[in-house]
Amino acid sequence: MSQKQVVWVCIVIMLLLVAWGTQNAAAQEKSVADAAIAAKVKTAINGDTGLSRMDISIEVYDGVVHLGGFVNSLADIARAEALARAVAGVTAVKSRMRLENRPTRAAVDHEVTL
């Protein structure tokens, strides 16, 4: 391999390392931003006297807030979603929250057969 080829190979390797480092830094910035959003949403939900007693999970991926857990009413779901949407940086809210005291279909079927 000639000296010129070695130089070109080194340049290509350096460019690849710089590109990889830039992508890695961007991913870390998104991760930090998502963590900050999650903390703000958690603070907002825990600041609500009705919602603070409930087991609501909060995860954030690329600015999208994912809410889960159990609440007492549909109004609680709507309030948690509204609080999450009000946080700066949130691009969307996806909810998988469930009503705590709502019987499942299996429980209803079981009650009917007794």
Image (spheres, rainbow, N blue to C red):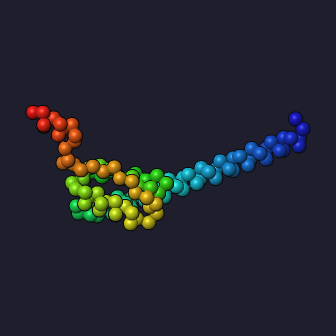
Q: Quadrant of residue 81?
A: bottom left
Query: How many numbered discs sit on the rendered protein?
Result: 0
Q: Residue at x 18, y 48 (%)?
A: 101
Query: Seen from this angle, which residue lies furthest left?
Result: 114
If the image is split into quadrants, where does the N terminus sit?
A: top right
Q: Quadrant of residue 38?
A: bottom left
Q: Residue at x 19, y 44 (%)?
A: 103
**Of the pair 43 and 106, the residue shown nearer to us:** 106
**Of the pair 111 and 75, the residue shown nearer to us:** 111
Q: Residue at x 37, y 61 (%)?
A: 84
Q: Residue at x 58, y 54 (%)?
A: 26
Residue 36 shows up from this direction: no
> How far from the left and from the top, in percent, is residue 98?
27, 49
If the image is split into quadrants, where does the C terminus sit?
A: top left
Q: Quadrant of residue 104?
A: top left
> How far from the left and from the top, in percent, is residue 60?
43, 53
Tell me: residue 100, above or below residue 49.
above
> How far from the left and from the top, in percent, is residue 50?
22, 61
User: Is 21 on the left-hand or right-hand side of 94?
Assistant: right
